[in-house]
Every structure is written in structure tokens, then in C-alpha cells.
Image (cartoon, grey):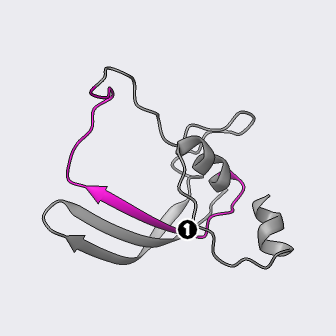
Amino acid sequence: MVRYIRQKLQVQFLDVSAGGKVLAQLYHEKLIDEVRLTISGQIAGLFSSQGQERTKWFCPPEGYPAFTHVTSPLVHFKGIRAYGENHLFVRGAVEYRH
């Protein structure tokens, strides 16, 4: 679908706000070229306040191998901004190694 949007419809920018499963598949397919991350100054544990286990990010999608320290994509930071004392906004370009 994303390749169709890019190649046939000539869409250059697509904002993807998704969870780890969707993002992991997009990384495996090498469809993400830039990331924008928001980092908040609060450490979250394994369980939510309701006692539910939090989603594990970047678990390999079914049929895909797990990234290793040699094959995981790298992010080259292009911009970093701080907002107040508790938020960082990071923008970076993705380099694929798999």
C-alpha cells in the first residue's frame, strides 16, 4: 500500500503514527526514511497504571527476522529541540543495514 502511494500517486510525505508492530514492518520493508520522535522525561515500566503489560516496540513481524546490533536501522540526527524541562523533539534520517 505504501509503495503504491509513493510510486503511483507520487506522495512524497506520509505521517505514520502507529504502534511498534506497524512501525517494525515498515522498517523491515525499508519504507521509512525519516523519523520524528518525542521523548518525555518520564520513565515507564513494563506495566501500565492499570496493571496491563505495555506493548514491546519493534518485535519482528511474523515471518521477519529480528534486528540485531549489526542489522538494525540507524538514525542520523538532523535536529533536536527541547521544550521545557521534560520534552525533547528529535528528527533524524534512517540508514538501513539489512
Let me know if residue 41 is in the magenta part: yes
43 sits to left or right of 34: left
Q: Quadrant of the N terminus?
A: bottom right
Q: Which residue is mark 1?
A: 94
Q: Give the magenta-colored segment's residue range.
A: 28-49
- Vertical comparison of 69 with 47: above or below: below
Mark 1: give few (<14), some (14-19) or many (20+) Cα within 10 Å.
some
- For the C terminus, the quadrant is bottom right
Majority SS type along the magenta span? loop
* Magenta region includes residue 17: no
Q: Residue at x 53, y 56 (%)?
A: 17
**Most foreground residue, 77 or 86:** 86
Mark 1 lies on a secondary structure that is: strand
> In front: 21, or 75?
21
Q: Residue 90's x, y, as percent?
A: 36, 69
> Where on the picture, by quarter, is residue 48?
top left
- Asked whether, in this view, residue 64 is left or right of residue 18, the answer is right
Amino acid identity at mark 1: Val
Residue at (83, 74) in percent of width and height: 7
